Image (cartoon, rainbow, N blue to C red):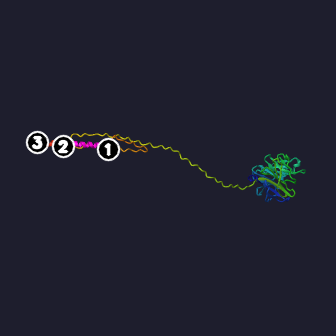
């Protein structure tokens, strides 16, 4: 479906069923051949050609006026033909800023560039030859691939066939291999489609105007597409791109992007250094103090008894057991020994005191006797 829509285009066709009435404008969709009436023109037109650069159609009236027309049929007369031979033109095509017209036995080239100093002037004219094709090609279209004009020629003898015309020399010849067409009085409309085929319509074939697709790919196939009532004059040109509705795509749901969790940075924990274990001071040595002799008449003082040695409370570091201090002798034993020594000293002091008192009493008694 998308490919078919991309190859579709619309050609405009003018036709008149009477000898002197105005033309009816049709839009013909190619490659299907479906035709739709646009309206009736104010002019009777023939020799229709389409300018892609200007996006406009050019045609010639029976009086030799050149008409410019848009897709809806709004037409404007822009001038008169530059040569009397162009009056009553029957075939037309446009390429670039050149308007190719066949009238009588010649092809005329007209300048349609609005900015050119030779606007609507005659560029060239070429007589058609050989003589058998002089008056037989009723319409053509320009092929940019080879610079030739393609149309259908009807002859006095034999079947109609597809021919090419060199606009610079007028040389007209059938295709090789030849492509023959159904019989008819004349093929008054010819236009290239988007697929490169030639779409040719005859004026009257058994009371109908029939549209054919002519393949130019070497197969030589000719396919009937559609039919309309027969017409006295007929011409077509195109193709402009058909307007297609925009393609609405369904909304695209984008799944949420799952971001994997970022691993936390690896940290190396250095254990804190263990506190230094304080050195345990050695126990103080036990000293024994010998009391000095107490002089006579003085009250002896008790000797100083040193306090029992004490060890400082060990600091308990984390996860390191403190060293256990073991004194040389149990504290209880040291205290007991000190108590015994103190008691002995007291006894000696008491004995000395008694001796002193006794000696003093004896001395006093002797003094009284004397």
Where disc 3 sits, the SS reads helix
Q: State the separation of the CA atoms marked 2 and 1.
A: 33 Å
Where disc 1 sits, the SS reads helix
Q: Residues within 10 Å of mark 2 (few under 14, many from 20)?
A: few
Q: State the separation of the CA atoms marked 3 and 2.
A: 20 Å
Cβ atoms at labels 3 and 1 below 8 Å apart: no
Seen from the viewer's position, the closer of residues 342 and 141 is: 342
Q: Which residue shows up at 21% across the image and 42% down it?
A: 349
Cβ atoms at labels 3 and 2 below 8 Å apart: no
Residue 177 position within the rendered picture, expressed as x and y whole percent measured from the top left: 85, 46
In the rendered image, the quadrant that contains the C terminus is top left
Residue 248 position within the rendered picture, expressed as x and y whole percent measured from the top left: 69, 55
- Residue at numbered disc 3: 367
* Mark 3 / mark 1, whichever is N-terminal: 1
Seen from the viewer's position, the closer of residues 53 and 356 is: 356
Q: Residues within 10 Å of mark 1 (few under 14, many from 20)?
A: few
Q: Which mark is residue 332?
A: 1
Most extreme residue toward the right, as rendered? 157
Seen from the viewer's position, the closer of residues 174 and 351 is: 351
* Mark 3 / mark 2, whichever is N-terminal: 2
Q: State the separation of the CA atoms marked 3 and 1.
A: 53 Å
Badge count: 3
Where disc 2 sits, the SS reads helix
Residue range of the region highlighted in magenta in the rendering = 332-351
Task: State whether residue 132 appears in this view.
Answer: yes
Q: Majority secondary structure of the magenta segment? A: helix
- Residue at numbered disc 2: 354
Q: Nearer the viewer, mark 3 or mark 2?
A: 2
Question: Does the magenta run of residues contain 334?
Answer: yes
Residue 122 position within the rendered picture, expressed as x and y whole percent measured from the top left: 81, 49
Question: Does the magenta run of residues contain 272?
Answer: no
Q: Which residue shows up at 32% across the image and 44% down it?
A: 332
């Amino acid at each position: 479906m998308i490919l078919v829509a991309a190859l579709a285009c619309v050609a405009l066709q003018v036709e008149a069923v009477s000898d002197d009435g105005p033309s009816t404008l049709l839009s013909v969709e190619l490659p299907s051949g479906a035709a739709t009436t646009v309206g009736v023109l104010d002019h009777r037109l023939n020799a229709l050609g389409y300018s892609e650069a200007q996006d406009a159609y050019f045609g010639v009236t029976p009086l030799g006026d050149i008409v410019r027309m848009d897709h809806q049929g709004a037409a404007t007369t822009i001038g008169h033909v530059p040569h009397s031979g162009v009056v009553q033109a029957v075939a037309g095509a446009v390429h670039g800023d050149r308007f190719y017209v066949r009238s009588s036995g010649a092809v005329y080239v007209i300048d349609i560039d609005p900015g050119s100093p030779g606007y609507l002037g005659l560029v060239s004219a070429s007589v058609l030859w050989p003589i058998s094709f002089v008056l037989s090609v009723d319409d053509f279209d320009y092929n940019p691939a080879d610079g030739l004009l393609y149309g259908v020629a009807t002859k006095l003898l034999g079947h109609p066939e597809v021919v090419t015309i060199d606009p610079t020399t007028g040389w007209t010849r059938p295709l090789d291999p030849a492509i023959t067409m159904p019989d008819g009085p004349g093929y008054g409309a010819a236009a290239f489609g988007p697929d490169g085929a030639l779409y040719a319509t005859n004026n009257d074939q058994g009371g109908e105007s029939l549209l054919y697709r002519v393949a130019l790919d070497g197969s030589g196939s000719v396919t009937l597409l559609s039919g309309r009532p027969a017409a006295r004059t007929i011409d077509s040109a195109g193709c402009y791109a058909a307007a297609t509705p925009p393609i609405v795509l369904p909304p695209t749901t984008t799944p949420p992007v799952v971001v994997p969790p970022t691993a936390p940075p690896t940290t190396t924990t250095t254990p804190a250094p263990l506190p230094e274990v304080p050195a345990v001071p050695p126990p103080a040595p036990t000293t024994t103090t010998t009391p000095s002799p107490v002089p006579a008449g003085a009250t002896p003082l008790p000797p100083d008894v040193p306090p029992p040695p004490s060890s400082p409370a060990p600091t308990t570091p984390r996860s390191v057991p403190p060293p256990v201090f073991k004194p040389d002798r149990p504290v209880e034993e040291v205290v007991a020994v000190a108590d015994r020594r103190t008691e002995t000293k007291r006894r000696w002091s008491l004995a000395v005191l008694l001796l002193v008192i006794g000696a003093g009493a004896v001395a006093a008694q002797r003094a009284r006797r004397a």
